[in-house]
């Protein structure tokens, strides 16, 4: 190797060593700077604790029940000639539902009416004979026995006419039973016996079932511990709200109309019932719904976001954020809560700021940085290309 090339190699080696030393010193400086800055604040979403008037509500699961359910049956035998409605149709009270062949009952009624007419004619003849015999017996033209027989015939015919009138009334009643009308307004179910089938005497088969759907009941149960609160407020009429769990915004309002007269000893619950107008038939018999019983309003209660309340082995707690960004784990007693708010009985006084999202990385005494909702969890670090290749 020549002297010139040897000098160039030495120069290059010295420059590389200088660069490495500079990089090492720069890295040590950055680490020292980060150490001086302390731990990076944890990003969280925060919410306020306020004092306000809150509704006192009790929540339960209820079941929709019709006010009345009628199983329509035939009261006379015969052929079912026609159904005057469509399955599942709403019917009004008194609307014709079925027709049973009336001809056999029309014949019975005609026969009874003819028998009545004959006996009425015989009665007139017997009364005339009795009037005539009354004069003849006084003149001894007929015997007393003959007169008594005529009088007996009059009484017997009168009794027969009374029986004929009863027979006609029975025939008229049976004839009216050939037309079956809706006893209540409501929604019809499945047609269980089709037209053309024969209805047997004393047939217990149901033709159709009608459920009254407007108004309608919602029955639910509450723990017996709330019975005194409910009873103390029933004078003013308590409002009951019901809605399907899958449609929480479609709410229906009714009134509490029934409290059972005994507590269920097996479950220590009391049954209650609300009445709903249900003109749109949104509540359906047999449907399970969420029920909210409104007992009134409570002023000046401490309310925290429900998402801020966490549970540990020591009980329920929240992370309170101080003015300097540090957090304190505060045990609380939650009186009740729903999807958005938690009513705090002890532990908070109002005015605090608490962690709502990002609890997983928060530690007591640690620092946090308040961000907008959805930004509390940092994005996952992307792996370097070299790591991905390995």
Image (tube, rainbow, N blue to C red):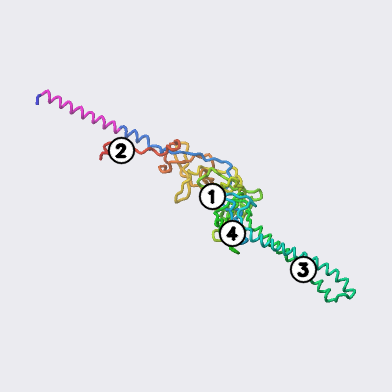
Q: Residues within 10 Å of mark 3 (few under 14, many from 20)?
A: many
Return the disc, 2 or 4, that comes first in the chain's sequence: 4
- Residue 5 falls within the magenta-colored stretch: yes
The mark that comes first in sequence, 3 or 2, is 3
Q: Quadrant of the N terminus?
A: top left
Q: Is residue 205 above or below residue 20?
A: below
User: Residue 147 at what x, y percent from top left?
Assistant: 84, 73
Residue at image position (78%, 67%) is 122
Mark before the other along the chain sequence, 3 or 1: 3
**Image quarter of the C terminus:** top left
Q: Nearer the viewer, mark 3 or mark 2?
A: 3
Where disc 2 sits, the SS reads loop
Q: CA distance from mark 2 to mark 4?
A: 83 Å
Which image quarter: residue 387? Answer: top left
The residue that disc 3 covers is 157
Q: Quadrant of residue 358?
A: top left
* Range of residues picked out in magenta: 3-28
In percent of width and height, residue 309 lies at 48, 45
Answer yes or no: do the residues labelled 1 and 2 have beta carbons within 8 Å?
Answer: no
Magenta stretch: helix, strand or loop mostly: helix
Q: CA distance from mark 4 to mark 1?
A: 43 Å
Query: Pointer 4: what residue?
Result: 79
Give the answer, above or below, for where 156 lies relative to 37: below
- For the residue pair 378 and 241, the one nearer the viewer reads as 241
**Residue annotated with mark 2:** 383
In this picture, is 56 found above or below 145?
above
Mark 3 in CB contact with mark 2 (< 8 angstroms) = no
Front in this rendered view, residue 167 or 310 = 167
Q: CA distance from mark 3 to mark 2?
A: 114 Å
Q: Which residue, given by chain and number where applicable, does mark 1 sit on?
A: 289
């Amino acid at each position: 190797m020549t002297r010139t090339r040897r000098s160039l190699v030495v120069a290059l080696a010295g420059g590389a060593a200088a660069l490495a030393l500079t990089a090492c010193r720069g890295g040590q400086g950055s680490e020292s700077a980060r150490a001086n800055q302390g731990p990076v604040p944890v990003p969280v979403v925060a919410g306020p604790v306020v004092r306000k008037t809150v509704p006192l509500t009790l929540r339960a699961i209820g079941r929709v029940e019709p006010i009345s359910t009628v199983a329509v049956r035939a009261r006379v035998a015969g052929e079912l000639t026609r159904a005057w409605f469509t399955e599942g149709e709403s019917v009004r009270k008194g609307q014709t539902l079925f027709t049973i062949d009336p001809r056999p009952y029309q014949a019975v009624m005609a026969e009874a009416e003819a028998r009545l007419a004959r006996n009425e004619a015989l009665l007139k003849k017997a009364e005339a004979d009795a009037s005539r015999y009354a004069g003849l017996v006084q003149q001894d033209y007929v015997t007393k026995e003959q007169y008594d027989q005529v009088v007996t015939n009059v009484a017997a015919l009168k009794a027969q006419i009374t029986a004929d009138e009863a027979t006609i009334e029975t025939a008229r009643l049976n004839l009216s039973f050939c037309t079956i009308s809706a006893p209540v307004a409501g929604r019809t179910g499945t047609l269980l016996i089709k037209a053309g089938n024969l209805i047997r005497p004393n047939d217990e088969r149901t033709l159709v079932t009608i459920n009254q759907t407007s108004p309608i009941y919602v029955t639910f149960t509450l723990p017996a511990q709330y019975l005194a609160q409910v009873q103390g407020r029933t004078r003013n009429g308590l409002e009951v709200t019901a809605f399907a769990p899958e449609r929480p915004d479609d709410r229906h309002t009714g009134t509490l109309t029934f409290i059972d007269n005994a507590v269920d000893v097996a479950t220590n619950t009391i049954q209650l019932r609300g009445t709903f107008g249900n003109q749109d038939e949104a509540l359906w018999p047999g449907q399970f719904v969420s029920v909210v019983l409104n007992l009134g309003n409570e002023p000046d209660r401490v309310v925290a976001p429900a998402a801020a309340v966490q549970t540990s082995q020591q009980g329920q707690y929240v992370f309170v954020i101080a003015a300097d960004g540090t957090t304190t784990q505060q045990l609380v007693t939650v009186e009740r809560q729903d999807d958005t708010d938690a009513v705090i009985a002890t532990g908070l006084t109002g005015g605090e700021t608490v962690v709502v999202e990002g609890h997983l990385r928060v530690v007591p005494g640690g620092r946090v940085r308040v961000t907008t909702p959805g930004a509390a969890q940092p994005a996952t670090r992307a792996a370097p290309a070299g790591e991905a290749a390995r």
